[in-house]
């Protein structure tokens, strides 16, 4: 699995983190001051990159969490059939089928940008 460990204090809004074994993009990050008997805590809220579910967690800022390494790639649409598009990766020339997002319209020979993590793909 392409991922690495980071401390919670190193996370930033707009970066990625694993929540409930799913890669999520951080929407909100806040910290609470350390108390008399404890360390500072961070609250992280995010949205699933591939499933759009909202998730959150609260942990000490010195705790370690997994951060997914999500690749941003370039592709070219080969053909469009209904709600699916056949896309060719411009680096490896591998072809695969992707679901077309509802607010997008693809045409043949169109260049697109997509995210890939462990076989999951999503158009940016």
Image (spheres, helix red, strand yellow):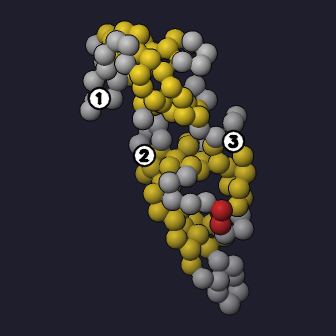
Residue 39 located left or right of residue 13: right
Q: Residue 114: x, y in percent?
A: 47, 30
Q: Residue 46: x, y in percent?
A: 48, 54
Category of crowding for the residue at label 1, using alpha-carbon neighbours closer than 10 angstroms: few (below 14), some (14–19), many (at least 20): few
Tell me which label, 3 or 2, sits earlier in the chain: 3
Say if 124 sits above or below 17 in the image. Answer: above
Category of crowding for the residue at label 3, using alpha-carbon neighbours closer than 10 angstroms: few (below 14), some (14–19), many (at least 20): some
Q: Mark 3, mark 2: which one is toward the viewer? A: 3
Q: Which mark is residue 104?
A: 1
Q: Mark 3, mark 1: which one is toward the viewer? A: 1
Q: Which mark is residue 3?
A: 3
User: Is residue 45 visible to the viewer in this orientation of the structure?
Assistant: no
Image quadrant holding the C terminus, namely top left
Q: Are marks 2 and 1 in contact (CB under 8 Å)?
A: no
Q: Which mark is residue 23?
A: none
- Between the C-alphas of marks 3 and 1, the distance is 30 Å
Say if 81 sits above or below 37 in the image. Answer: above
User: Is residue 88 visible to the viewer in this orientation of the structure?
Assistant: yes
Tag 2 residue: 53
Q: Residue 118: x, y in percent?
A: 61, 29
Which quadrant would residue 23 be assigned to in this image?
Answer: top right
- Between the C-alphas of marks 2 and 1, the distance is 21 Å
């Amino acid at each position: 699995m392409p991922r690495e460990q980071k401390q919670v204090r190193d996370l930033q809004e707009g970066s990625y983190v694993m929540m409930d074994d799913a890669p999520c993009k951080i929407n909100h990050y806040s910290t609470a001051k350390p108390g008399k008997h404890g360390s500072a805590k961070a609250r992280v809220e995010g949205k699933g990159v591939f499933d759009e579910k909202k998730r959150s967690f609260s942990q000490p800022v010195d705790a370690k969490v997994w951060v997914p390494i999500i690749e941003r790639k370039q592709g070219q649409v080969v053909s469009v059939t209904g709600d699916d598009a056949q896309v060719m990766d411009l680096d490896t020339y591998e072809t695969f089928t992707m679901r077309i997002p509802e607010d997008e319209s693809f045409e043949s020979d169109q260049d697109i940008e997509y995210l890939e993590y462990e076989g999951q793909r999503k158009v940016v």
